[in-house]
Amino acid sequence: AQSVTQLGSHVSVSEGALVLLRCNYSSSVPPYLFWYVQYPNQGLQLLLKYTTGATLVKGINGFEAEFKKSETSFHLTKPSAHMSDAAEYFCAVRPRSNDYKLSFGAGTTVTVRA
Amino acid sequence: GAVVSQHPSWVICKSGTSVKIECRSLDFQATTMFWYRQFPKQSLMLMATSNEGSKATYEQGVEKDKFLINHASLTLSTLTVTSAHPEDSSFYICSARAGGFYNEQFFGPGTRLTVL
């Protein structure tokens, strides 16, 4: 069974500051890893994903994440926060198989201070 | 990119009535569609997985007779909340994926259901 832990339900950053959202997974085999963003009353938009290859993954809107197998982590970062980054962020995993069900973390709300 | 739509975007209904929510893949054929439920300030909980032409697979604890899912075509899945009650009020989100090993889920914009 897989589980996803997002440390910190709420993160507040100043505009222009680093955004760091933490995600750790728990599974015997490293899963496929995803970060999604959700704006109020909207569905989820994929920011980036890791399946194989280079462990540093670049996504949309200036976000990137690094898969660290030794730490079972997939933390999301953005060097400089913008007001438009205020949203809910979800880390998700799915098995390396033909099971396409996603397991989501609890989510992290990001607020950006002017 | 792949687009998934949901209709309606919001609905208010009286307790005891049934509500149908549509999920459509607009520019691709979806071999599999997923239905999620999201309570305020919480994560998404998978309710069921539906494959075109076959019965949906429900997650543990989800009442299949209450949440009827029909995946009649490769571009349309419907979720019907039968005899809705206030505790069914939630944000319902669907997702769809095309075939292919690396094809992931694309999410719809969600439907806000309020049962009075």
Image (spheres, coloured by chain):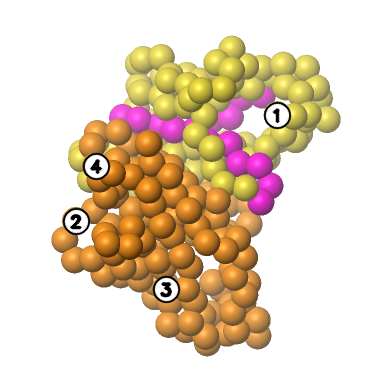
Q: Secondary structure at mark 4?
A: loop
Q: Colour of chain A?
A: orange
Mark 3 sits on what residue?
A: A77
Mark 2 sits on what residue?
A: A52
Chain under callout 3: A
- On the same chain, marks 2 and 4? The answer is yes
Q: Whole-Å distance between the Cαs marked 2 and 4?
A: 10 Å
How far from the left and from the top, in percent, is residue A83? 59, 78
The C terminus of chain A, quarter of image: bottom right
- Based on the picture, tell me whether residue B26 belongs to the magenta stretch: yes
Magenta segment: B19-41
Name the residue at 20% across, 40% down: B101
Q: Whole-Å distance between the Cαs marked 4 and 1?
A: 33 Å
Chain under callout 1: B
Q: Whole-Å distance between the Cαs marked 3 and 1?
A: 36 Å
Give the vertical position of B45 relative to A78 (above or below): above
Q: Nearer the viewer, mark 3 or mark 1?
A: 3
Mark 4 sits on what residue?
A: A96
Q: Amino acid at mark 3?
A: Thr
